[in-house]
Amino acid sequence: MSKEYGYIGKEVIQAFRDNKGIFTPQDIIELDQENKWTNFGQLELIQTQNADDSSSSLDFTSIKENIYNVHFLTVNNMSITSAGTNSRSILVRLSNNGGSSFISSSTYERAHQQTNSTGGFSSVRSTGISYLNLTGAQTNSTATLSSNCYIYFYNLGDSTKYSFSTVHSSGQQKGNYQRSHFGSAVYEVAETHNAIRLVSSTSSENIEIGSASLYGLRFT
């Protein structure tokens, strides 16, 4: 590290000096491969988890909130074990103690739009709820159905700001039709959040299949 050049590393500084301030394409390729060339806005994988029918939740407990101020979570082909007659979904809860517990008090708010292939369209607005939305309803009475989605988290590591999220999901819903929803949510307490949990909306059911990958968005 150098005060003159910031956090770009000794190798970068030496290449800069050797080439009189000019990096060759090969310099950039080699530095990028060693993760020593800063590409602002690039996604850096933190962790991937795979669910099975015994997964009561998927917990990300080392999210590097001191490094990233924006996190990006993707969910692929995720479903819940039960094929009940009611709507199920997968929720997100945050932790302020590294995952020892997850906040389920009524301190979250959401504002979402949702639509389905039968032509239905509605707004979902709630205050005083106990979670952040991740997927829309996805089960019916005969089969377990799946969802795919992504969600951005903002300010998780900043104790002076609220933690926000934006989400977009697509999946199958009870009644065998397609459903999409998008929107935003907030946790209305300014504090550091350092772990993320994915869990079924009904505590008696597990996450059966699917994978989830958490990334940090590089800004330094």
Image (cartoon, rainbow, N blue to C red):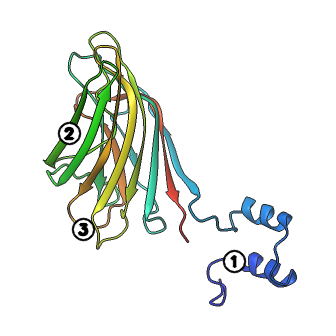
For the N terminus, the image quarter is: bottom right
Mark 3 or mark 1, which is nearer the start of the sequence? Answer: 1
Residue 95: image location, x then y, percent:
29, 56
Residue 108: image location, x then y, percent:
20, 52
Image quarter of residue 100:
bottom left
Residue kind at label 3, given as amino acid type: Ala
Mark 1 or mark 2, which is nearer the start of the sequence? Answer: 1
Q: Nearer the viewer, mark 2 or mark 3?
A: 2
- Circles 2 and 1, Cβ within 8 Å, touching? The answer is no
Residue 199: image location, x then y, percent:
31, 38
Q: Secondary structure at mark 1?
A: loop
Circle 1 Cα neighbour tier, 10 Å, few/some/many (<14 / 14–19 / ≥20): some
Does residue 11 show up?
yes
For the C terminus, the image quarter is: bottom right
Q: Residue furthest top?
A: 142
Horizontal relation, residue 111 to residue 220: left or right: left
Query: Which label number is shown at residue 9?
Result: 1
Horizontal relation, residue 194 to residue 88: left or right: right
Circle 2 Cα neighbour tier, 10 Å, few/some/many (<14 / 14–19 / ≥20): few
The residue tagged 2 is 124
The residue tagged 3 is 190
Horizontal relation, residue 214 to residue 130: left or right: right
Gap between marks 2 and 3 measured at Cα: 24 Å
Query: Which label number is shown at residue 208?
Result: none
Residue kind at label 2, given as amino acid type: Val
